[in-house]
Every structure is written in structure tokens, then in C-alpha cells.
């Protein structure tokens, strides 16, 4: 069961390679680079 949490949201954004709320651009599967 996925809840609407900041971490979960960041994970989904990372999978899509979208820009995070922080404004950091991340490529698909580059969660470490964003952090």
C-alpha cells in the first residue's frame, strides 16, 4: 500500500526522470544523484 509521502513522491518522480521539488534534475533511476 503506497501512501502519499514525500519520499514516495520523489521515487515516482525519479522513475519518470522528472524535476524534483528541490529543482534538481534527475535521470531515470538516478535517485542517488538527486539526493
Image: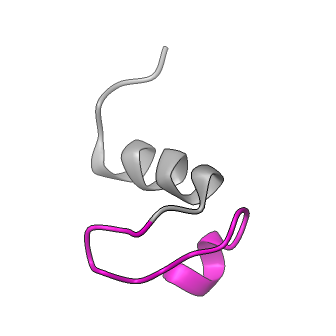
Please report the residue visible at 43 percent of the width from the left and 55 percent of the height from the top.
10
Query: Which one is in front, 9 or 25?
Result: 25
Q: Quadrant of residue 22?
A: bottom left
**Chief secondary structure of the magenta span?**
loop
Describe residue 18's horizontal placement relative to residue 31 as left or right: left
The percent coordinates of residue 25 (x first, y second) are 48, 80
In the image, residue 19 above or below residue 6: below
Describe residue 23's horizontal placement relative to residue 25 as left or right: left
The percent coordinates of residue 34 (x first, y second) are 52, 81
Query: Which one is in front, 9 or 26?
Result: 26
In the image, residue 10 above or below residue 8: below
Circle count: 0
Describe residue 26's horizontal placement relative to residue 28 as left or right: left
**Coloring scheme used:** one colour
Q: Quadrant of residue 31?
A: bottom right
User: Is residue 3 inside the magenta stretch?
Assistant: no
The percent coordinates of residue 8 (x first, y second) are 43, 43
User: Is residue 32 inside the magenta stretch?
Assistant: yes
The percent coordinates of residue 28 (x first, y second) are 70, 63
Please report the residue visible at 61 percent of the width from the left and 85 percent of the height from the top.
33
Q: Residue furthest right?
A: 29
Q: Which region of the structure is painted magenta? A: 19-35
In the image, residue 6 above or below residue 23: above
Please report the residue visible at 66 percent of the width from the left and 73 percent of the height from the top.
27
Please report the residue visible at 60 percent of the width from the left and 51 percent of the height from the top.
16
Amino acid at each position: 500500500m503506497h501512501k502519499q509521502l514525500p519520499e514516495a513522491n520523489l521515487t515516482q518522480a525519479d522513475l519518470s526522470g522528472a524535476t524534483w521539488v528541490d529543482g534538481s534534475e534527475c535521470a531515470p533511476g538516478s535517485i542517488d544523484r538527486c539526493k
